[in-house]
Image (cartoon, rainbow, N blue to C red):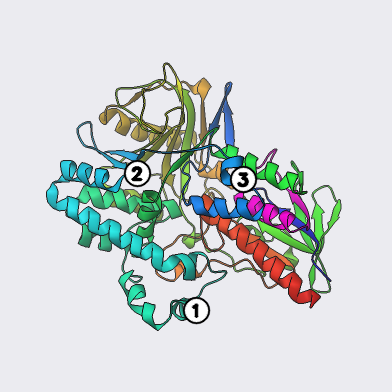
Amino acid sequence: MATDRVVIVGAGIGGLTAAVELAARGLDVTVLERASGPGGKMRQVAVGEHRIDAGPTVFTMRWVFEAICEAAGTSLESEVDLEQAEILARHAWSADERLDLFADLERSADAVAAFSGPAERQRFLNFSKDAQAIYRTLKEPFISATRPSPVGLVRRVGPGGLGGLINIKPFATMWSALGQHFRDPRLRQLFGRYATYCGSSPYVAPATLMLVAHVEQDGVWLVKGGMHALAQSFAGLAERLGARFRYQTEVSEIELERGRVSGVRLGNGEPVPADAVIINGDTNAVASGLFGKRISRAVPPTPTADRSLSAVTWNLVAKAEGFPLSRHTVFFSSDYQAEFDDILAQKRLPRAPTVYICAQDRDAQDGPPPEGAERLLCLVNAPAIGDTHPFHPAEIEQCAQSTFGLLERCGLSIQLDPAHTQVTTPAVFEQLFPATGGALYGRASHGWMASFSRPGARTKVLGLYLAGGSTHPGPGVPMAALSGRQAAASLTADRVSIRR
């Protein structure tokens, strides 16, 4: 039977990408989403009259989205209004220690020299070269591959590429590799933070994650209307291509007939027939039986100990004074290792957190700050124990004191108003994304084999496919979009094979 009717469960960026690709190929696509609109983790929340991005805030790897749009007969410029950021991010350790990284590599190198001395300037350039080499080595044989394995990676690179694989230091931790690159511990801290983009600790994650530094150096863009506008745009594109969307629609079970997918059953009992189903959600939701026991063994479960980081976030509308926020600003903990020990070993909120702020009314060129109150997303990392720990108000208040106390010490004063603040804890993330404990990135990238532990698009159940940040190639908006492309490609290839 040809797979012409496709149901996609979840309208996150992976599901949206798959919907665009399959609808463009003429398949009958229906997207079912339990929320009231598209986006998944790329969501917005309402704070008073304001809408604030409450999920991913950084747009990178533009080529991924250009390819998706081109395959759909359009262009990224036609679908999304983008502006390249001049400042990649601003970083602070105290009121007197501040470092900006720029879209221009030489300008960043000069800033590093002014911050840490001329010797660190050259070390930064060497680090950037290594990060680029790691990215180029892994882009085709790993990132863009459907389901790589260590042996398959070596085969795809070929004998001539073995030296390149060794040079990416797959067995070294990110922290140890950064220690070889930089003498200034603050720079190790800055670039070690890129491991948290995958929900991981730089003390355990492999050095290959240094490639994230090159991904940002290759370009960071601001999306007009916020990142949620990207989800809305891709949903609109899929609809123009013929896909149907049903929001506030919960799927209770994936139905099988003779061992292969035959459709889904909704929470209200309604059956929706399908020849193939793509689940765009955390793979542990499948393994936990949330879509029925019959498919629970389609993918392995994620052990609690292997979960990625969660977060506590404050979405707020407030006046920020005293520190010149950029669009993306990071305020670093005074004890970085203790922060990860608290989260991963002690399973508690960090006593001295690193704080990320996305100032959503700041422009790409570091122009003057907005007058009056502005929209802010404030985030600290947290343990993914939202399914077993309720996070009492006293804990959150103590975390808030540590968080905003650090901002004060760095010169930033934020006038908090509970009426214009929405707090999200790991327990709330667990409610939004069940069976995760609030983990925002699927499985943590700890150890050199972790990246090969993510399932690919195909499962053990015929006609059942996976997409999203917990599948290969990993978390983050562009990676999740690539997983949607790979799910669509796998489904299409299987469809052709069945017809033959």
Identify the residue under disc 3: 40
Count up the numbered dots: 3
Q: In the image, what residue occupies the spot 63% across and 41% down? A: 233
- In the picture shown, does residue 500 fall above or below 174? below
The spot of residue 272 in percent (x, y) is: 84, 55
Callout 3 amino acid: Gly
- Going by the numbered disc 1, the residue's amino acid type is Gly
- The range drawn in magenta is 12-40
Secondary element type, mark 2: loop
Quadrant of the rendered image containing residue 247: top right
Q: Which residue is mark 1?
A: 152
Where disc 3 sits, the SS reads: loop
Distance between the alpha carbons at the discs numbered 1 and 3: 32 Å
- Relative to the observer, which residue lies in front, 104 or 149? 104
- Secondary structure of the residue carrying numbered label 1: helix
Residue in the picture at 68% in, 50% down: 10
Residue 439, visible in the rendered structure = no
Residue 303 picture location, percent across and down: 52, 64
Given the image, on which type of amino acid does mark 2 rest?
A: Ala
Q: Please tell me whether residue 52 belongs to the stretch shown in magenta.
A: no
Marks 1, 3: nearer the viewer: 1
Structural distance between the alpha carbons of marks 3 and 2: 29 Å
Q: Which residue is mark 2?
A: 103
Mark 3 and mark 2 lie on one chain; the one further toward the N terminus is 3
The picture places residue 111, in percent across and down from the top left corner, at: 22, 42
Tag 2 and tag 1, C-beta contact below 8 Å: no
Residue at 53 percent across and 33 percent down: it is: 224
